[in-house]
Image (tube, coloured by chain):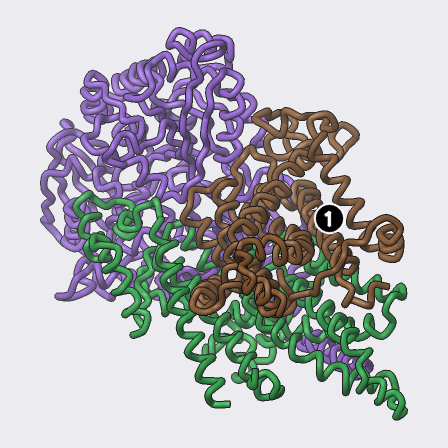
Amino acid sequence: MQRGWAAASAAGVALALLLAACGGGSTYSNGAGTKPAASTVFTYDTYTQVMVDGWDPATEYSNGIIAMSNMYETLTRYNPVTHTVDPLLATSWSHSPDGLTWTFRLRPGVHFHTGRLMTAQAAKAAILRTKKLNGGAAYIWGAVKSIDTPSQSTMVFHLSYPSPLALQASADYSAYIYDTQAAGSGSLAKWLNAPHDAGTGPYTLQSWNNGKEFEVILKASSTYWGGWKGPHYKKVVFRVVPQDTTAAQLLRAGQVSFVEQMSPTQWKSLQGASGIKLVSSPSWQNLLAQLNAPALSQPIRQAISYATNYPGIVAALSGAAVQSSGIVPAGLFGHFTNLPNYTYDPAKAGRLLNSAGYGPGKKKLNLSLTYTAGDSNEQVVATLLKSSLAKLNVNLTVQPLAWPTQWGKGKSSSPSARQDVFMEYWWPDYADPYSWFVNLLLSEKQPFFNLSYYSNPALDKQINRVESLVATNPSAGSALYRTMQVEVLKQAPIVFLYNTNYQYAMTNTFSGFQVNPAYPNVIFVYNLKP
Amino acid sequence: MLVFVARRIALAIVVVVGVIVVTFVVAHVVPGDPAATWAGPHASAAAIARARTFLGLDRPLAVQLISYLGGIASGNWGTSIHTHLSVLSDLMTAAPASLELVITALALAIVVGIPIGLVSARRPGHAIDHLVRAGSILGISMPIFWMALILQLVFSQHLKLLPAAGEYSPGLLFTHPLVKRTGFPVIDSLLGGNLPMLGSTLTHLILPAIVVAAYPAGLIARMVRAQVLDVIGDTHILNARALGFGERQILARFAMKLAWTPVAAAIALVFGYSLVNTFLVESIFDWPGLGSYAAASISTLDTPAILGVTLFVAVAYVVANLVVDVVQAVIDPRIRLR
Amino acid sequence: MIESPTIAPPQAAVPRGRALRQGLAANPLLTVGAAIVLLIVVVAIFAPLIAPFPGDAGTATNPFEVLKAPSAAHWFGTDQVGRDIFSRVLFGARVSPVIAIIVLVIACLVGVPLGVAAGFLGGWVDELIMRVTDVFLAFPPLLLALALAAVLPASLTSVTIAIAAVWWPWYVRLIRGQAASVAGRPYVEACRALGISRLRIIFRHILPNSITPVLVQVSLDVGGVILTASALSFLGLGAQDPVPDWGLMVSEGQRYFTPDWWLVTFPGLVILMTAFAFNLLGDGLRDLLDPKRSFLL
């Protein structure tokens, strides 16, 4: 009987191994692998669900742009090398001397995936709909008063105040041009969320498996205006792999082409691995701790700023972080290195706390911090902050929450339900410092992203006029940005924890990869050569 | 016989209703705001209020419970807040993957556990017995999330023998696409004659199944050993020995037969236990089953989904116990006469 | 976890002196288990003295020593914020076993009275209690604990409550069997006829008989509770940083697992060792105390 069992089990195992040899090939051994048709499929490995904000290009404001930027296009696209915008759906543009009238010439012969021709009227309809829905980063069109379409390929924008429209049209959110007639007489929002895509981009939606590992699959759009001459990827797969150890293994096995994020030591460990290329690059993304200004007085906020171990954070994140200088990251207009930044000075922090009645030897201060669950860098920083504050008789309770819950709590209408410290990343909607000020520091009646609940009327006035100033007098605009940053640093409603360094890992089976900080984590797969 | 089955079914239904009530009560201690999650990150206060009405969260708790009970009976298990799909359909999508894993693991556990238990029972007190006892205790003491990580590290990364994650190789999606019939990748590839896919699904099953099988294998080995040793001194065994039956035959034909009853009960027990254990390993192996769904529901405070998963697994467990009880009653008349 | 559906070992005298020593010698697994459990208890008590970096079990961090491999300075290496893992593992011995003790005490405090009531009083009391118990037993333990812990704020307290809420039914069943078998005996009827109160019967006859099976069950359960608690902490529902809970340490270490294998390996190994030791102990105790188990040898 035992022999029988053993024989049966042995036979079963042998059969399984035999079948394994037939199928799957050596895809999990190191090396090039024997995946059929591998060179036409680009697999983007991300750690969190891609389409969490719906399928409407007008209101998307989250992770979905990594997929959308391959299905949809904007009028212009930011070029990180030349620091200006390149033509995309618009071939040329000009503006009147007072900056109030902008004329764009559109590219002819561009078709939406629905088959319709992209005309100035269609583009106008898209922009006006985006503006009306007022979701995502729709504020980028805030200056637009009206749009004329004197010809099929000409758009004339009339602005109510000067604004760098060509730059704003290159934004990573709310700047897509899409077919507003795609659903015919039905509801466009419903049609888009079915899901369908109504873009002009090189790829179009093949399938969406909500909540599954192979979440989004795109296929090449045969009618793309750029054509398909030369080597191009024909399919793009977005694969959700929450564990970055698994992601690294998949990369080594050649089963994914690109991994969006992994822990710094994981990334470093891939150095020298065959078939893998590592890219490290500065980004325009910074990690901020927004301090609850109404709840915490200025000395306390400044104390927290001095209690943050900036060099420690940089060391602990092994290359994923760079110390910040002010609000605006390096590489962007408005960045300055000679600002009155805070340094790690526990003694000074202690004195400031004492002046408020807290700190070493005085009353214990209890603070609450929320960060996004699953983000290991945020977790490390929160733990380090807790540790530094504990030495100063401040008890920081750290709570990881899923992003929607964290944000919901921060936006809570009852102030007592809110946190004392809100940790989040920020990056600009277009290549300009304005995004930080208008979203994080402008007074809000109902909290949205200004989660320091900060209100400074003088600063508000400056924020409201800086964009027009930049459009007409760039150097004055730059000086104003400097002044604003000095004030913000002094008032300390936000602690600037660090600037992110992208650490990407990818296979070396393609060329043409370029990091574009204006489109965080986006790969324009069409531009890659397999 | 019929009376016995009817009674057991009635009892099971009572238990299931109790399960629903308990789960409902548990889930409504939720501190977060599901309406806010439903309405999405950009919702205004008005939109959240509309969502609350839409989700029925503004009614009194007792009313919600009754309507929920009625809904369950009629197949409406609510709508998941994070996927916006019907919870039941979400569960139907996710369940096959977990069930495939659990069934494979249990099969593995039985194939390994029973012979080992028999071997151990054959020579009680000897070295091999102690080894098997220690080994099976090790099996039931194993933190399976840790075992999953270690096995993944050793077999996938270092030895490169087995795949790291997923249900099958992604490249095969395009060259040998899987036609979904039952939702079980192994069965579907068999039905479709898709041999490469079949091989891939089987190899991807190996590591997760071994991990989930550790506890049941240990448990079954111990049970078999205990039960066999329990009956080995009985008169009818002595009789069989006197009649000249060989030791192996005695174990197989006589001892094992009697041991089946509690072992079968144990299998029902570990079915439920293992189904929940898969929750711990699914994220590690990127297995798209109930565990991944539960994890997503927990992190988004998706009450209907959490309720749904808990209910689903509990009901599966009750059904498994019911089936085993009835089968045992068929095999062993003593049980239904009790 | 009760392994066979019905357990009601007849009363047995706890062996003393020579009989105990003989029992131990004959059961090497019990001895090993007891020794490891003793080691864990010693470590838990003396952790602040043994640990090289006791502050690391609290809020101390060392950002310039993150993710260092095991070395002479840090036997188990350092974690993602530079804390000494060996020290944290030692302090962890104060976390999981304590949860297990609290859970099982609660389970007994709730389960034993209910079991006595059900078994001794019989009738509708018995039916009611057993139906409710059945409902709770219909959930695989981790599942209900998971659902509970998911809706309570994540903390050690929540995990303890969640697991206790799931574990008490087993004790009801256990004691009910005892109580019912005693309640049916003729001498109990005689006592009642003589006017002796039910309470006295419970305290003089039922409870003393129950000590042994409860003791055995508790020692068998400690391992299971520790595994369940570490699983819940692994899922993020239990202890929060910086509590040196072993399951939490495995969970946090996951992201760094390759190449920094030490964050996950050592805490997980210790969970395994602890559960293993308690299971060995429980097994051995059952063998020792239950004469029906003639295969002690």
Q: Colour of chain C?
A: brown
Q: How many marks?
A: 1
Residue A27 in view here? no
Q: Dot 1 corresponds to which residue?
A: C273
Q: Chain of mark 1?
A: C
- Residue C228 x %, y %: 58, 52
Q: Is residue C152 visible?
A: yes
Task: Tell me the quarter of the picture where residue C72 sits.
Answer: top right
Camera-nearest residue between B141 and A240:
B141
Image check: C14 left or right of B123? left
A409 with respect to B110 (left or right): left
Task: In this rendered view, identify the residue nearer to me: C48 or A138.
Answer: C48
Residue C182, image x, y percentages? 61, 65
Residue at horizontal 35 percent and vertical 49 percent from the top: B29
Seen at 55% across and 45% down, the residue is C233
| Residue found 19% across the figure and 23% down from its top | A465
- Is residue B9 placed above or below A442 in the rendered structure? below
Looking at the picture, tell me which residue is in the foreground, B226 or B165.
Answer: B226
Rendering colour (chain B): green
| Element at label 1 | helix
Q: Colour of chain A?
A: purple
- Which quadrant of the figure has residue A333? top left
Mark 1: amino acid: Met
